[in-house]
């Protein structure tokens, strides 16, 4: 009987008795080792919230896709579930057993029931072990075999199962003798040899050639049916996830920003980040052109995540309550100077270095450079604003005031998005919050 | 194809010495790249696409030998001395690598990378002009001037690749070879970089040879495409035409096995690419080809030109009078050993 985790109102997800994995408010934080100077002065180097307050259920026989860019925390989440990275808070229950806080000895017993398939087949197999040794190793570790003949029988059976047939051909080979696809088959064989119920597959096909990808995915589908497996499929590739997954969770900077049935996510994505990921997939259909309104920049530093919604600095649909702050102002200036590098030197000379607060504040002061008045700086800011008044940043600015040696920017009140019902899925975006979405200005240009 | 090509490759062969014998990674390849054109070279690992890119620039490792012709401004680059090639590389022929992380010197500021590059080829430039040209190139790839004096480690992977592109562009090369420029990047950043490359021809007239395994990137960013298999270009032509109606069975099967958002059923190509130490007789794809005929296992196909200007190496497209009677019968294929399955 699965243990019911503490009921949780914030996650908005009901506990599910049919789930073989129940994750509630899971947190995996990493302490950053600061410099010697930081440690001497007692300054905090900060923490990275790689997995931050994540909740979901995984039902028997289901394929859940965890999708996001590098640095979204998807791999850390998968590793936390297997106890390969210790979670620092929350709960993850696997077949009735709490994993968070479990010691290595107990985890090892559990791991015969849940296994991992790694991304890089060239690195996941020990080059000094034969395929028989590598694939049979879990049996030896868990004391499942009586003798060498027994081991060989099991290894032969599992190799044939993953398409490495005739198995005798491969037993004595070393990973270096195998192609990428064959190696990944061996990695999968090693993962299923203990008869697990759950496979965490971390980018299992992203290192493989296109024509080999479909073979490995087909193999994983066949195994799922014949062995009644449940998959957590971690990927950055929404195209393979669409084909492979029953449900999808989109992650960004340690949080799930959208989760729901795969069909709903692909047919009607709600979160702007999901839309962007879908749009960015290069499509071999020549009738489709290049996407034009891509999010700018890249996933930000997880040690200092943006305030409010973590995606707002890149979001083409961001608006007033998304968490605008001084760093967005600095980005705005940089973008302006990139467009007109001639003006950069003289304009930069007007601006001092503002403080960057750790948490949202009602207003900030942008200092002027020595000898420059607040009015001069304000005039520059207004000029930049006039260049592109539709830029989402300005929705977050309530007022600009020139003072003595500074310009004060007053911000809109920021809100942190929570997962809310959005059609058949759930999305953490203010656009899905009727109370906030009405504050969005009339969209400029086409909005799909 | 438009006007005069800026680079013409004729019968280029590149061989590597290996412990098990010489490997012909590029085997009698011919292609043209026109001014301002983007040519996609696409194929799977080991098909020779990267070697082709490097062979054109004369950037092959010591154990490699090239023969044939790479004609640039009436000169054959194959057989040029290292010094002659070094003078051409940069201002005439540029290269962008796959791993932006490892190609910038961690001890040099971005500013110094540009200064070194520009001084190497234009020793007379003064500081202000170097700065002006550098910032213009960086601006084109979206790097703010405020970061000109930072070090490589202060940039993300996508920004480093932008810097690499700007470094290649600052010398205004006629041809830029981009070898898997987005493979190490996330999908949104990849799309940003592809857009920069696609915009290049509009803004600078630089021709781009884009080497990639990703058919989607070729479809979105390239004018023409060359499909490589086992060291040979099996089909080349207008990218839209090739993707809409592939003429070579390999192109067709590769497209079908690519997983996209429209995929509803997985498709695979049986078997694996041949090893190039002892390549198979006849067409190199015949053992995996669903349309193979008897002749395909015996005689290598002759390149044919199709009506739309496409060139294809496949007996299905003739010349039909060169095929002996009865040789068009379907090839009875040996069971492809599962052992060879990738």
Image (cartoon, coloured by chain):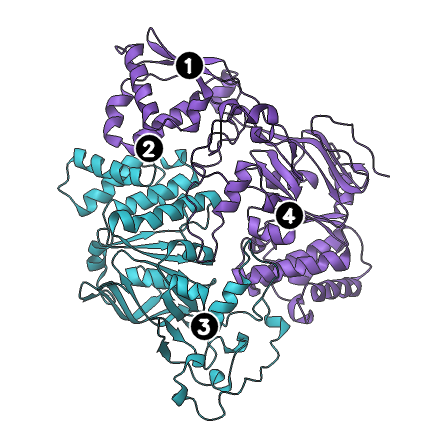
Task: Give the residue pinned by disc 4.
Answer: A263
Q: Are marks 1 and 3 on the same chain?
A: no
Query: In front: mark 4 or mark 2?
Result: 4
Q: Are marks 1 and 3 in contact (CB under 8 Å)?
A: no
Kindly check if marks 2 and 1 are in contact, taking CB atoms under 8 A apart as contact: no
Work out how far the residue at label 2 is from the one at label 1, CA to CA, in angstroms: 27 Å
- Dot 4 lies on which element? helix
Mark 2 = which residue?
B144
Residue beneath the point at 78% across and 39% down:
A106
Q: Position of residue B212 (x, y in %)?
A: 42, 57
Q: Tag on residue B212?
A: none
* Closer to the eye: label 4 or 3: 4
Q: Which callout, 2 or 1, points to the residue nearer the camera?
A: 1
The image position of residue A309, as x and y in percent, is: 54, 27
Q: Residue at x 53, y 38 (%)?
A: A273
Q: Nearer the viewer, mark 3 or mark 2?
A: 3
Task: Tell which tag, 1 or 3, sits nearer the viewer.
Answer: 1
Which residue corresponds to mark 3? B248
Counting residues from the N terminus, which is met first, the one under dot 1 or under dot 4?
Answer: 4
Label 2: few (<14), some (14–19) or many (≥20) C-alpha neighbours in 10 Å: many
* Chain A: drawing colour: purple
- Where is residue A401, by image quadrant? top left
Secondary element at tag 3: loop
- Subunit of mark 2? B
**Nearest to the observer: residue A67 or residue B101:** A67
Name the residue carrying label 1: A399
């Amino acid at each position: 009987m699965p243990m019911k985790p503490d009921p949780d109102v914030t996650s908005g997800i009901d506990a599910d008795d049919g789930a073989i994995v129940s994750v509630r408010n899971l947190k995996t934080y990493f302490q950053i080792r600061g410099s010697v100077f930081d440690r001497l002065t007692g300054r905090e180097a900060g923490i990275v919230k790689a997995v931050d307050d994540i909740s979901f259920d995984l039902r028997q026989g289901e394929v859940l896709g965890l999708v996001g860019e590098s640095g979204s925390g998807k791999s850390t989440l998968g590793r936390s579930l297997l106890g390969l990275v210790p979670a620092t808070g929350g709960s993850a229950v696997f077949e009735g057993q709490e994993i968070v806080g479990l010691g290595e000895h107990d985890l090892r017993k559990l791991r015969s029931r849940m296994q991992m398939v790694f991304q890089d087949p060239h690195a996941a197999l020990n080059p000094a072990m034969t395929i028989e040794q590598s694939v049979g190793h879990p049996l030896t570790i868990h004391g499942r075999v009586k003798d060498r003949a027994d081991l060989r029988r099991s290894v032969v059976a599992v190799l044939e199962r993953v398409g490495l047939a005739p198995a005798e051909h491969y037993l004595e080979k070393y990973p270096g003798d195998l192609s990428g696809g064959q190696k990944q088959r061996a990695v999968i064989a090693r993962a299923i040899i203990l008869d697990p119920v759950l496979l965490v597959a971390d980018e299992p096909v992203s290192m493989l050639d296109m024509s080999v990808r479909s073979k490995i995915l087909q193999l994983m589908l066949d195994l799922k049916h014949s062995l009644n497996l449940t998959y957590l499929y971690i990927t950055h590739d929404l195209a393979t996830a669409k084909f492979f997954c029953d449900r999808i969770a989109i992650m960004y900077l340690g949080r799930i920003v959208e989760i729901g049935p795969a069909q709903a996510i692909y047919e009607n994505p709600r979160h702007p980040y999901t839309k962007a990921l879908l749009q960015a997939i290069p499509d071999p259909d020549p009738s489709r052109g290049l996407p034009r309104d891509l999010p700018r920049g890249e996933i930000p530093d997880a040690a200092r995540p943006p305030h409010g919604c973590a995606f707002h600095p890149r979001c083409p649909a961001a608006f007033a309550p998304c968490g605008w702050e001084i760093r967005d102002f600095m980005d705005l200036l940089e973008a302006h100077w990139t467009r007109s590098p001639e003006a950069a030197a003289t304009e930069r000379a007007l601006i001092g270095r503002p403080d960057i607060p750790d948490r949202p504040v009602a207003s900030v002061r942008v200092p002027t450079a020595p000898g420059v008045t607040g009015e001069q700086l304000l005039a520059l800011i207004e000029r930049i604003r006039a260049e592109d008044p539709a830029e989402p940043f300005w929705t977050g600015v309530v007022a600009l005031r020139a003072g003595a040696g500074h310009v004060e920017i007053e911000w809109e009140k920021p809100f942190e998005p929570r997962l809310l019902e959005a059609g058949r899925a759930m999305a953490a975006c203010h656009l899905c919050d009727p109370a906030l979405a009405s504050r969005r200005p009339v969209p400029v240009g086409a909005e799909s | 194809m438009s006007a005069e090509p800026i680079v013409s490759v004729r019968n280029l062969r590149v061989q590597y010495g290996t412990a098990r014998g010489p490997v012909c990674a590029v085997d009698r390849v011919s292609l043209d790249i026109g001014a301002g054109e983007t040519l996609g070279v696409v194929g799977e690992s080991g098909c020779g696409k990267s070697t082709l890119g490097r062979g054109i620039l004369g950037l092959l490792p010591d154990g490699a030998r090239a023969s044939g012709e790479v004609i640039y401004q009436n000169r054959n680059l194959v057989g040029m001395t290292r010094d002659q090639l070094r003078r051409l590389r940069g201002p005439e022929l540029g290269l962008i690598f796959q791993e932006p992380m490892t190609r910038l010197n961690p001890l040099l500021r971005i500013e110094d990378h540009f200064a070194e590059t520009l001084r190497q080829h234009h020793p007379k430039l003064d500081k202000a002009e170097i700065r002006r040209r550098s910032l213009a190139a960086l601006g084109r790839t979206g790097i703010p001037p405020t970061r000109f004096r930072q070090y490589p480690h202060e940039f993300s992977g996508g920004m480093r690749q932008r810097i690499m592109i700007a470094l290649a562009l600052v010398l205004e090369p006629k041809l830029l070879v981009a070898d898997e420029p987005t493979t190490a990047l996330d999908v949104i950043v990849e799309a940003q970089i592809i857009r920069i490359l696609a915009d290049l021809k509009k803004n600078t007239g630089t021709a781009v040879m884009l080497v990639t395994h990703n058919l989607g990137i070729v479809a979105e960013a390239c004018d023409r495409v060359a499909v490589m298999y086992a060291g040979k270009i099996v089909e080349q032509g207008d990218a839209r035409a090739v993707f809409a109606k592939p003429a070579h069975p390999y192109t067709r099967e590769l497209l079908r096995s690519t997983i996209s958002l429209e995929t509803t059923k997985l498709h695979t190509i049986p078997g694996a690419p041949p090893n190039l130490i002892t390549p198979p007789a006849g067409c190199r794809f015949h053992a995996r080809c669903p349309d193979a005929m008897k002749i395909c296992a015996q005689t290598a196909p002759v390149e044919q030109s199709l009506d739309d200007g496409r060139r294809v190496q496949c007996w299905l497209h003739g010349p039909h009078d060169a095929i002996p009677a009865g040789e068009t019968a379907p090839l009875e294929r040996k069971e492809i050993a599962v052992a060879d399955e990738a």
